[in-house]
Amino acid sequence: MNLYLDSSVLMKLYKQEKDSEIMDEIIQKIDNGKWRGFSSKWSFLEMARALKKDKKPKEVITVDLENLRSHKIDFLSLRDNIIPKAEELIKECNLYAADAFHIATFKSIKNADAFLCDDRHFDRLREVVPVKKLSEVEL
């Protein structure tokens, strides 16, 4: 299975939340090569902000981000050709810029099966991309 991992699900690797154990299983499948995981490099910025907002010290944020980089997730570069697609999504779907960028990046991946997300803003976008909650993934 080829999964796009939004920062809302990546955060579950570093903060115990509902469905964190499911994310642990998914990351094991990715690290073992059974599944492929994708995300945008933008996720590192969102993760750093979420960890800081969670009052983690700079040293812990640094360690957590290095740990995230150690997983076999393909973090895709912020590419210029994604921006016009994200702009269209903002106009069509009334999205935040970061959300539009994630969806445009997802759409640039060939054979991506699902957009894994735990952000309620994406629930209304199931007709635009195959949004799945962690609890909807068949392990």
Image (spheres, rainbow, N blue to C red):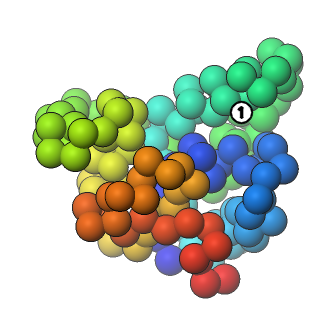
Q: Write the residue at 27% across / 54% down.
A: 108
Q: Residue furthest bottom?
A: 138
User: With respect to residue 92, does 56 lie above or below?
Assistant: above
x, y (%) of residue 42?
A: 47, 32
In this rendered view, identify the residue nearer to me: 19 or 109: 19
x, y (%) of residue 16?
A: 84, 50
In this rendered view, identify the residue nearer to me: 127 or 139: 127
Read off the residue under disc 1: 65
x, y (%) of residue 41?
A: 49, 36
User: With respect to residue 105, does 48 lie above or below?
Assistant: above
Q: Write the residue at 59% across / 77% down.
A: 137
Q: Residues within 10 Å of mark 1 (few under 14, many from 20)?
A: some
Left or right? Give the position of 107 relative to 102: left
Left or right? Give the position of 94 relative to 24: left
Q: Write the residue at 56% across / 66% down.
A: 133
User: With respect to residue 54, does 24 lie above or below?
Assistant: below
Residue 124, image quadrant: bottom left
In this rendered view, identify the residue nearer to me: 53 or 33: 53
Q: Write the residue at 28% across / 56% down.
A: 107
Residue 21, image quadrant: bottom right
In this rendered view, identify the residue nearer to me: 66 or 92: 92
